[in-house]
Every structure is written in structure tokens, then in C-alpha cells.
């Protein structure tokens, strides 16, 4: 309708009143701007023509903006400027089923793994799903792209509201991001350029509060070297005890120092090959490989202090470093760790996770699964730890090992034989198995859990559906 023929508010009011009262009670007076159009459509009822034209104008008419209306927040605009495509509908439905079906105690961990899987495939979460999912994933920087960070800035804490809403974190803008993103960025930079990453931290270190300084300083454990000593030793007089504690721990872990060499030598002496006479006997009865390397803790690690003492001794060491110092391979060292000694396993695990050493992560998990035997309830914590630290699904070899392990088979049998609702619940073995398996083994996993009740395997099936839907879109 030309602008000269736009109805006034009074014209619209009269048309509405006539239509509401009924044309029998109040005959319709065709507004002047519409008379030519009504005459041109003489073959149809003039009232219908006026109603259609008035309705169209009302439909596209924008209400006047009040002076008190707040502008659209920048975070709201940035949420929709994330360049990643939104999660495909089939994968989205599977993700929501997972969120609704997973046990509450695992929700944060499982949904974080799922969100990282989505991000790894180049997608982002649907904006309508962020209110449901954000509380479970907001503590994991690996899950938070531009859209998720913008949503947090709109809805969460004051710290999130003040963050930089750039698509990527860089050396120029990193201080504008939340602490979890800055720590992850520093670790990433340390893997590439240790010295320049340390300089990046030194430039801003004094301006940060104590709790932030300590957490950022801890990121220097990646790529730690003697060049870091001057900065670390200068923090012995820092005003915060937490910062001094982190600095002292890092100084003790610097490779190439006498203290480090002495501790490495002591830790390596805990692992040794069996003597020849014992080895010959074991070889004749077919057990030489199983007992080729033995573990003997130092005399100081005994009694109630054993765990704490071993934790201090092995802190920061990798299985490969211990093996090299002892003349062994990393695999031999891992195989020789006593199954009930969590301190050494934890130290190697933390180092492997820090170095993103996926091969060692899987070796350590496989050793724990093997040691578990038919104790099916041991598998879930091991797989949860592995899923949290892997940047992608486990290898095919590990997947075959997991599905064929005694612990997994025992879990299946226990769930099939369960007779009470409590016993029928997945203890985490199924959902975490689904979370770590490579995509090619997911059909085999589904076949193995087919006999189980739907309520038992609901969350695991939802994770499998999500993983398969993501792959189908690539």
C-alpha cells in the first residue's frame, strides 16, 4: 500500500470498532485511502477488502520505541555471531535425551564430554538449549566457544559479564577472558613457546589477585625448565602463601637441577628387573614376562605415610622419565605399579594429562582395568578419568581391550542378573564406556548392551546416538 494511502490511527480504530460491534449494528465506513482500492475490487465484498488491507497494515506496523527501552546487550549480539553452525537436529535431540537421562552425579562430567565432542566436530550448541546445559559445562573451558561465553555474560556472574567476547583468545586479548580460559591458554602457549608464555605471565602477574596469581602460575608446569628458575625463585617473597607454595613446588620440579636429579634417581631405584636366578626359574615356568620388573618402595615410604611419601617422590614425573632413568620402558614401569598403589598411578596420570600424552593415558587406564579383574565397579572411575582427559575418542586397540575386559563383562552380567531397581541402575560403566569408545566400535557396544532394560542403558544409548549423529554429518 503506498505511503499516501496508509490508514491513520483513527481510521484503524473505526474499522476495528465496526468489525467488533458487527456491521449490522454499525455500518462500515470505508476510509478515504481505501476507497479506490475497494472500488477496484467491486466484485467482492467491500468489508472483506477493507478488513484484509487494514489487517496487513496492522501486521507490519512497528510500535513506537519508548525512550526508556534499553538497547540490545552486546553479548546478545555476539551470541549469534559465533561462526560455527548449530548442532544438527538429530544430534541435538540425542544430546537433550542424554541431559534428561544421565544420573545427576555424572551430569556435569558427561555433558562436558558431550559438549566437547560437539565442539570437536565444528558445531555449537543450539541457543535454546543453553539454559538447560550451561550449568553443567560452564566450568570446562574446552566446552565454551563464543556463543556459550556470550550466554554466560548475559546470565551468569559479574566475572563472566566483564569478559572479552572475541571469537578466539590471543596474546593480545587473553587478559579479558575468564580465569579458566586464561589458564588453558597459558598451558597451550607453554607447549609451543615456553619462554614467551612465561614473559606473558610476568607482564601481568603483579596486577592479579592472589588466588588468580597462584592458579596462573600453576600453568607453568608445562614446559618447565631452568630458564624459569629466576622468575620462580623471585616469588619466594610473594605476599600470598598460596603463591609461594606453588612456586616452591615448581622449583622442586625443574628438570636439570640437583634436587630434581636426586629425586628422579631415588624414584627410578624403586623399579628394577628381577635377578637372573629368579628370572631363570620364572622363565622355565612361563612367568618371566609377568615378573620381569618389580617395584620396591624406598624405606622412608612405609606405614601410614606410604601414600604421602610416594606422592611427593613421584610428583611431576612421567613413566617415560622413570623408565629412562631405570633402564626400562614406560610400559614396563606402568605394568610394575602395584595395583593398590594410587599415589604413583596418580602422579603418572597427572603428568600424562598435562602433556596431553594420550598413549600413556590409555596405557595407565588399561593397566587399571586389567588389575581390576572382575571387580566391575572399579571400571567406571577409571573410564571417567580417561574420558575427561582425552581430546578425542580412545584408540581402536584400547576399545577392543575395554569391551573384552573382565571388568566390563562382569558389569554386563551384574546388570542382566539384577532384580531390584537399585541394582539395575548403571554404575557408570556403560555411560563412560560409550564416552571413550571410538565410533567404529559403538555398534558392537550397542549389541552387547541390547539384553539390558531400556532404563539401565538409556543414557549410554543417548550418548551413542549423539556420537553417531555427529559423524554422519561430517
Image: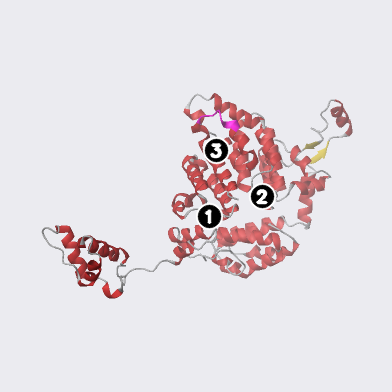
Farthest-out residue, left: 25
Residue 385 versus residue 398: which sits nearer the camera?
Answer: 398
Which of labels 3 and 2 is toward the front?
A: 3
- Asked if 411 appears above or below 21 in the picture, the reply is above
Question: Is 255 on the left or on the right of 377, as rendered?
Answer: right
Q: Residue at x 87, y 26 (%)?
A: 284
Q: Residues within 10 Å of mark 1 (few under 14, many from 20)?
A: many
Question: Is 363 on the left or on the right of 413, as rendered?
Answer: right
Which of labels 1 and 3 is toward the front?
A: 1
- Asked if 64 appears above or below 118 in the picture, the reply is below
Over which residues does the magenta segment extend? 447-453
Q: Residue 79, position in %: x, y? A: 48, 61
Residue 391 versus residue 185: which sits nearer the camera?
Answer: 391
**Which residue position holds label 1?**
124
**Which residue position holds label 3?**
460
Q: Residue 39, position in %: x, y? A: 22, 68
Which of labels 1 and 2 is toward the front?
A: 1
Q: Residues within 10 Å of mark 3 (few under 14, many from 20)?
A: many
**Which residue position holds label 2?**
353
Q: Earlier in the sequence, mark 1 or mark 2?
A: 1
- Confirm whether residue 252 shows in the render: yes
Mark 3–mark 2 Cα distance, whole angstroms, equals 25 Å
Amino acid at each position: 500500500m503506498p505511503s499516501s494511502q496508509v490508514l491513520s490511527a483513527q481510521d484503524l480504530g473505526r474499522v476495528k470498532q465496526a468489525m467488533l460491534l458487527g456491521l449490522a449494528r454499525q455500518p462500515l465506513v470505508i476510509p478515504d485511502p481505501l476507497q479506490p482500492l475497494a472500488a477496484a475490487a467491486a466484485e467482492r465484498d467491500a468489508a472483506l477488502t477493507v478488513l484484509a488491507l487494514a489487517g496487513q497494515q496492522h501486521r507490519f506496523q512497528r510500535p513506537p520505541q519508548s525512550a526508556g527501552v534499553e538497547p540490545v546487550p552486546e553479548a546478545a549480539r555476539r551470541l549469534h555471531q559465533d561462526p560455527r553452525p548449530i548442532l544438527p537436529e538429530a544430534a541435538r535431540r540425542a544430546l537433550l535425551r542424554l541431559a534428561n537421562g544421565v544420573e545427576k552425579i555424572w551430569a556435569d562430567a558427561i555433558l562436558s564430554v558431550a559438549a566437547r565432542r560437539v565442539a570437536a566436530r565444528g558445531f555449537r550448541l543450539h541457543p535454546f538449549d543453553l539454559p538447560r546445559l550451561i550449568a553443567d559445562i560452564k566450568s570446562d573451558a574446552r566446552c565454551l566457544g563464543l556463543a556459550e561465553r556470550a550466554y554466560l555474560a548475559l546470565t551468569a556472574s559479574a566475572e563472566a559479564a566483564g569478559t572479552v567476547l572475541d571469537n578466539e583468545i590471543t596474546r593480545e586479548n587473553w587478559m579479558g577472558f575468564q580465569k579458566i580460559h586464561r589458564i588453558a591458554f597459558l598451558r597451550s602457549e607453554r607447549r609451543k613457546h615456553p619462554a614467551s608464555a612465561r614473559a606473558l605471565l610476568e607482564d601481568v602477574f603483579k596486577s592479579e589477585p592472589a588466588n588468580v596469581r597462584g592458579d596462573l602460575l600453576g600453568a607453568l608446569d608445562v614446559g618447565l625448565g631452568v630458564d624459569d628458575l629466576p622468575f620462580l625463585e623471585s616469588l619466594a617473597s610473594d605476599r600470598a602463601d598460596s603463591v609461594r607454595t606453588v612456586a616452591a613446588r615448581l622449583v622442586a620440579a625443574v628438570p636439570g637441577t640437583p634436587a630434581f636429579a636426586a629425586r628422579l634417581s631415588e624414584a627410578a631405584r624403586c623399579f628394577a628387573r628381577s635377578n637372573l636366578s629368579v628370572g631363570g626359574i620364572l622363565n622355565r615356568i612361563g612367568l618371566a614376562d609377568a615378573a620381569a620388573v618389580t617395584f620396591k618402595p624406598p624405606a622412608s615410604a612405609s606405614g601410614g605415610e606410604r601414600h604421602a611419601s610416594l606422592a611427593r617422590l613421584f610428583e611431576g614425573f612421567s613413566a617415560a622419565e622413570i623408565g629412562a632413568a631405570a633402564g626400562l620402558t614406560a610400559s614396563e614401569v606402568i605394568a610394575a605399579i602395584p595395583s593398590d598403589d594410587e599415589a604413583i598411578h596418580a602422579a603418572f596420570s597427572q603428568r600424562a594429562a598435562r602433556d596431553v600424552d594420550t598413549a600413556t593415558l590409555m596405557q595407565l587406564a588399561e593397566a587399571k582395568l586389567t588389575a581390576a579383574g572382575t571387580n566391575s565397579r572399579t571400571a567406571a572411575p577409571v573410564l571417567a578419568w580417561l574420558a575427561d582427559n582425552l581430546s578425542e575418542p580412545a584408540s581402536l586397540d584400547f576399545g577392543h581391550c575395554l569391551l573384552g575386559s573382565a571388568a566390563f563383562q562382569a558389569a554386563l552380567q551384574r546388570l542382566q542378573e539384577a532384580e531390584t531397581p537399585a541394582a539395575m541402575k548403571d554404575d557408570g560403566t556403560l555411560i563412560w564406556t560409550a564416552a571413550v569408545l571410538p565410533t567404529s566400535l559403538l555398534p558392537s557396544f550397542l549389541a552387547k548392551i541390547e539384553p539390558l532394560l531400556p532404563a539401565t542403558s538409556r543414557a549410554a544409548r543417548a550418548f551413542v546416538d549423539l556420537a553417531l549423529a555427529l559423524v554422519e554429518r561430517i
